[in-house]
Amino acid sequence: MSKFTKKKSGELPAISTASLPDIVFMLLFFFMVATTMRETTLMVQNSLPTADQVEKLDKKDLVMYIYAGKPSQRYQQKYGTEARIQLNDKFADVSEVQSFIYSERDSKREELIPYLTTALKVDKETNMGLVSDIKQELRKAEALKINYTTVQGDATTGNE
Amino acid sequence: MARRSSPEVNAGSMADIAFLLLIFFLVTTTIETDKGISRKLPPWQDEEQPDPPKIKQRNIFTVVLNSNNDLLVEDEEMELKDLRQAAFEFLDNGGGAGSEACSFCQGAGSVESSVNPQKAIISLQNNRGTEYGTYIAVQNELVAAYNMLRNREAKRLYGATFTELEAQYNDPKTGEGRKESLKEKIEAIKDMIPQKLSEAEPKG
C-alpha cells in the first residue's frame, strides 16, 4: 500500500474536479433509463384530450399505437388539413388499419397476443367520424382492447 | 517504476463530454404519457342478429352528442359538468321492487329511473361531427359516475375505495396472497355494479 501513500508532496493541491464527470454521468444514466425514445416520428398534430378517470398502460411492448389528427404544419402542403391516420411512420388510410394490426400481431410472441392493447392517440379536435371508422376496423380485426390515451386533468374544463 | 513522474491524464474534459451526452438525451427523449381510458369494443357481427332483448325505457340513460358538441341527456339539454351527478343519480336510483330491488342503493327510488345498477344501461350516441375531445370528456364523466358508486360501495363493504383496491392490485409490490383477496373484492364490486356503457354507431 505504501506505493499510493508515498505520493503526497508538500504543495497545496488544486481542488479536484475529477468527481464532476461521475456526477454528470449519474444524471446521464438517470435520463437514459427514465426516458424512452420515440419510435415513430409524429406527422400529425397530437394534443391529447384530458381526463381524470385514467388507467395506466404499463407493458409498453404490448401496446400498438394508432395516431390520428391533422397533418403537422410541414406536411399540410402535401396532405391538406383534413385529419388523417398515422401508422408507424407514414400516413395511412382507414382500410390499412386491419393489416397494420395483423402485422403487429405477427411480430409478437403468440402467448402475448391476447394481452395486446391498441392505444388511440387522437388529437382532441378530430371528428368522431374518423375515430369510429378506426374503431370499426379494430372490431373487424378483433383488436377489442383499446385505450384512449389522454393527459391527466379535469375533463369538463380541459377539452374546450 | 521508471515512469513515476509521468503526469496524470487530464480528466477535466470528461465532464464536458458527459454534459454533451446528457443534453443530447434530454433533448431527444420524451417521457411517454401512457395513461388513458380503457374500453372494450364489442366483437364484430357480420350477419343480422336476432332482435335484442327488450329493455325497459326506465333502465336506459340516453346521452346524445351532436355535431356542435352539445349534450342531450334523457331528451333534455345538459351542461357537461352536471353529467356526472345525473349519471350517478340514475345508477343509484334503486327504484326496483321484489326480485329487482336494489339492496344498497341510496337514490330517490323514482319510478322513472333505473331499478338497480345491474339493469341500468347508459347509452351513448355521438355524431360523426362530434369533436373527439368532447367525446372523451363525456366518456370520462360516465366512467367517473360508475367509479363514484363503486367507491362508495367498496368503502362500505371493505373500508377502502374501489380505485384504491385497483391501485393496490396493480401494484407490483403487492404479495400474491393479498392479490387473490383483492381480486375477489374487485370482482364482487364489479358484479354488483357492472359497467354497462353501450355505444351506438354514430349518425350523420
Image (cartoon, coloured by chain):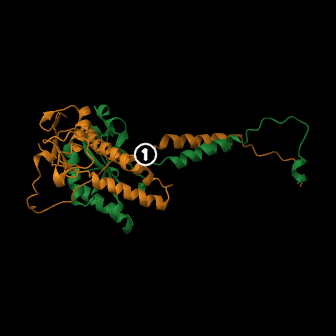
**Residue B200 position in % (x across, y down):** 16, 49
Left or right position of B192 against A24: left
Q: Residue at x 26, y 37 (%)?
A: B84
Q: Report the chain shown in orange.
A: B
**Residue B114 position in % (x across, y down):** 17, 45
Label 1: few (<14), some or many (≥20) within 10 Å? few
Q: Nearer the viewer, residue B23 or A129?
A: A129
Q: Nearer the viewer, residue B74 or B18?
A: B74
Q: Residue at x 22, y 37 (%)?
A: B86
In the rendered image, the vertical position of residue A97 relative to residue B30, given as above or below: below
Q: Nearer the viewer, residue A77 or A11?
A: A11
* Secondary-structure class at tag 1: loop
The residue wearing badge 1 is B32
Q: Is residue A82 visible?
A: no
Task: Write down the chain letter for disc 1.
Answer: B
Q: Name the image quarter holding residue A100.
A: bottom left
Amino acid type assigned to the residue bearing label 1 in the image: Glu
In the rendered image, the vertical position of residue B131 relative to residue B172, given as above or below: above
**Residue B133 position in % (x across, y down):** 27, 38
Q: Report the chain shown in green.
A: A
In the rendered image, the vertical position of residue B113 relative to residue B1, given as above or below: above
Q: Name the image quarter holding residue A11.
A: top right
Left or right position of A11 against B82: right
Q: Is residue B99 visible?
A: yes
**Which residue reaches farthest bottom?**
A110
